[in-house]
Image (cartoon, coloured by chain):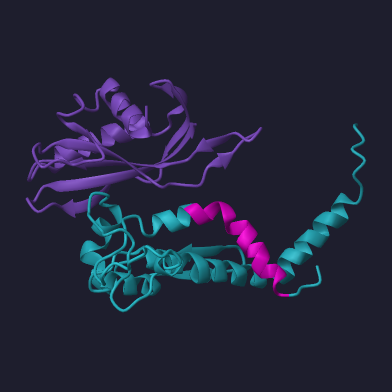
Chain colours: A purple, B cyan
Amino acid sequence: MTLVTDIAAYLVDQSVCTALGTDLFIMDLPDTTDLITAVFQYAGQPPGNTFDSAYDDQPGLQIRTRAAVDDLESGETRANAAYAALHGVANTSLSGTTYKLIEALGSPGFIGYDEKGRPEWTQNFRVIKEV
Amino acid sequence: MTDTGITNVDQCQKALEEIAGTEWGAVCKAFEKVVLGTIMPECMEECPVDTGVLKASIPLCSGVESNSLACTATIGAGGAAADYAVRQHEDLTLHHPAMTRGPGTTHSRDVVMSKFASFVPSPAGQYGKAKFIEDPVMRNAPKMAQMMASKLRGRGGSR
């Protein structure tokens, strides 16, 4: 499993989202559904060396939330639910991979409206996971 | 009481405090050089370019402040590009032709790739990527102390 699939499964498990492909997507933000969460991976930090040539991956994780036009409340609620579920996850196995830490780099940030006037938020996380 | 075998701790602490007092200005200067001379240029190189307004805003929104207690750096973008700077930085779905050269510039990637016979430079136009500030900062953060030490050594100090 990859970072984004692990996190997507966890968000469903934590009842932040309903199901992958309905209101939750990986590395994509399809136009079809208004209230939606998308999970992205980006570069993050260099690997953290441990011992015996081992290292931990430290990728960046972005949770992006979009809501229907004029529905700021649902979007904020969804973004904050993901925030609460993910921030502080420590020494936890997700889909068989050990996540040593998931730490929010800030609160969900409003990034504006899409071309249809739907509000969007992003929140970025630092992740330390075993390879 | 356990004998640690360490002596003259007080003198060591005093000497370190004296060094901190006399060299603090140099430390701040080294910090400024690393932030504005190394990391900020990487942010500019990775910044998406269409009109160039966003890229040009980076030096205007960046700087280092220091006082007797702390050095603080800011690397930012916005200014005249404030309306779209955040989205350009955060939206990982926006399509930017992958780090090719921008109008009137020679991107460092071109310099490297030009060593390969098959390399054909992309036409001038839009380039860059999302996370153009966060990525350079995050990948350089673990090396900050090492880079600052290098700048300080370069001063030819006697310590």
Left or right position of A6 against B24: left
For residue B143, above or below residue B159: above
Q: Quadrant of the N terminus of chain B?
A: top right
Please provide percent x and percent y for residue B52: 27, 74
Residue A108 in sight here: no
In this rendering, the answer to whether A66 lies above or below B58 is: above
Q: How many marks?
A: 0
Left or right: residue A85 compared with residue B135: left
Q: Is residue B59 magenta?
A: no
Seen from the viewer's position, the closer of residues B96 and B39 is B96
Q: Residue at 66% x, 32% y: name it.
A: A52
Query: What secondary structure do most residues of the magenta stretch adopt?
Result: helix
Instruction: Residue at the far bottom: name it.
Output: B104
Question: Residue A89 or A26: which is nearer the viewer?
Answer: A26
Q: Is residue B143 magenta?
A: yes
Range shown magenta: B139-155
Question: Which residue sits at x=68%, y=69%?
Answer: B152
Q: Which corner quadrant of the image does residue B55 belong to?
A: bottom left
Across and down, in percent, residue B85 comes to 26, 62
Query: Can you tell which quarter of the image residue B89 is in?
Result: bottom left
What percent of the width, then of the height, locates residue A98?
47, 25
Image quarter of the C terminus of chain B: bottom right
Residue at x-position 46% and y-position 67%? B115
Q: Give the percent coordinates (x, y) of residue A10.
A: 32, 25
B156 sits left or right of A125 in the view = right
